[in-house]
Image: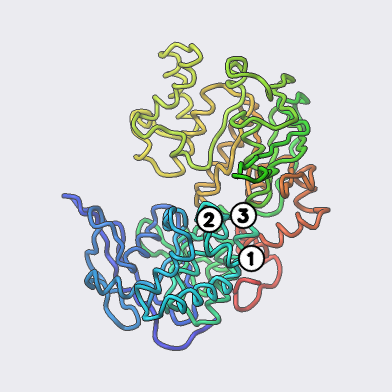
Amino acid sequence: MTRSGDPVLSIRNLDVRTTADVPKTILRGVDLDIAPGETLCVVGESGSGKSVTSLAVMGLLPPRSLALHGGSIRLLGEEIAHAGAARLRSLRATRMAMIFQEPMTALNPVIAVGPQIEEVLKAHSDLGAAARRARVREMMEKVHLPDVDRVYGAFPHQLSGGQRQRIMIAMALIMQPQLLIADEPTTALDVTTQRQILSLIDELRREQGTAVLFITHDMGVVADIADRVVVMRAGAPVETGPVMQILEQPQADYTRELLRAVPALAPRPARPERDPQVVLEAIDLTKRYAEKRMFRPARVTVAAEEVSFRLKRGRTLGIVGESGSGKSTVARCVMRLVDPTSGSVRVNGHDISELGRSALRPHRRRIQMVFQDPNRSLNPRIPVIDSIIEGPLNFGVPKADAVTRAYELLELVGLPSDAGKRHPHEFSGGQRQRIAIARALAMDPEIIVADEAVSALDVSVQAQVLKLLSDIQERLGVAILFITHDLRVAAQICDDIVVMRKGCIVEEGAAGSVLSQPTQAYTRALFEAAPGRHWDFPNFRPLTAMPASGAASA
């Protein structure tokens, strides 16, 4: 798609460095233009400089750590690279706005979302209170929020992830800025919600002529929404061009590597069953939450309802579905992080669903969990070697033996020998996830529960972690219960699939069957919502004809 008119945003030779005594270059030689109504996607691995570029444009570089060292940033023809704080505050929301990846960090948890959006109008318009409220409600309807009156008075924690992201979009667009910067706004969302958000951004772009700078590591999203693409590596652009050119005829080796790392939607070839032993079984697993209410009966929420499955040694069972489908609830019940309301969980034939703390302890070694965010499971204050040996020490393993085994595991997950002496913050996100896997393996488990363990990783790191899990499974015979909303990931790692919706299993079977010939409308809808479903990324070709615009379908 081509757009006419002068660029809304023009960046030339952008240079950002750290403020340390010996400065380190974070961005160098960044050039890009975005025309009115155009979507420019900036892609690359974590640490490539994508988000720093957006923060530089918004004037939000952390002053104690990063500083603009050179280059030009022109917004609607105005040079803003060295604009003062007051001018930048004026430009935010009125001329440019930003949507962040995690709305919970951007929204005030103690103020209702409606009044939070109103604050933007209060600061940047002359509208009276009644007009502001009317305008906010209008914008909430425009971003397709349900039950606007209820949502207006709701607090962020009372809304779903997709609803919170819609609130952020409403807040960003309430003043109709000419430039919208979206920094990984759909990374943590399930495919259905993700498609809704992408369609919404595209709809508003078309209606208002907004220029969109979209930062992402998801090449499926790029295929669906981009007009043009900038590929970044180590703080510098390596390739720029129209989306079709980048996807079909990538010129840079790095771009080709990124595309080859995108998992295919087609399931991997079925693996033969080597061991018939069932190591994990859920039987009619049910979890209900009762919300106590003053002077009214408790409100009961059914998170999981009569969920049953079997996992054999050395196999991977995937549980897929939208957010709120009950996937993580099942994982936590299996781990006994929460107690099931009814039903049973059997580990090697032993029912652990009603065991007390002391009786449960021996079974803890057999089943370990890898969380989505390793920062929450690794102690930031101690070296990683101490985190890895913590579990074995608690079970009476001599420290010398535990340390020796820990270093063997660090080597197994592909980390250098000195990694054990460093702290979690010294590693990338992918490396921290490898440490979390090593920590789980230190207990010599028979089962690993991976809850969205790769959803926040860029495609190349994601591919590395998936291969690591596959290699570990091949070598150690570990069974994996893999929780994910990403069908591409499920297709590449799972032997069997369980599809959940609203706490219930709606479809199950061999991965090759469920993912290639789904029988249920819900499963088919999940596939239809998968971004970039029409593309064979590793082979640089479309699977079917793509719309000429490359815009997200509604």
Q: Count residues near mark 1 (Cα–Cα under 10 Å), then give few for <14, some for 14-19, many for 20+.
A: some
Q: Quadrant of the C terminus?
A: bottom right
Mark 1 and mark 2 lie on one chain; the one further toward the N terminus is: 2
Check if mark 1's residue and mark 2's residue have beta carbons within 8 Å.
no
Residue 509, picture quadrant: top right
Task: For marks 1 and 2, give the CA distance.
Answer: 24 Å
Residue under pointer 1: 541
Residue 285 at what x, y percent from top left? Answer: 74, 34
Please tell me whether residue 389 is drawn above or below residue 497 in the rendered image: above
- Identified by mark 1, the residue type is Arg
What is the residue that sits farthest to the bottom in this orientation? 5
Q: Nearer the viewer, mark 1 or mark 3?
A: 3
Residue under pointer 2: 187
> Which residue is rendered at x = 39% and y = 24% of the image?
386
Residue 492 at what x, y percent from top left? Answer: 66, 46
> Which residue is rendered at x = 55% and y = 58% of the image?
259
Q: Nearer the viewer, residue 386 or 328?
A: 328
Number of numbered discs overlaid on the protein picture: 3
In the image, 152: left or right of 306?
left
In the image, 80: left or right of 388?
left
Helix, strand or loop at label 2? It is loop
- Identified by mark 2, the residue type is Thr
Residue under pointer 3: 190
Residue 527 at what x, y percent from top left? Answer: 71, 58
Task: For marks 3 and 2, give the CA distance.
Answer: 8 Å
Helix, strand or loop at label 3? It is loop
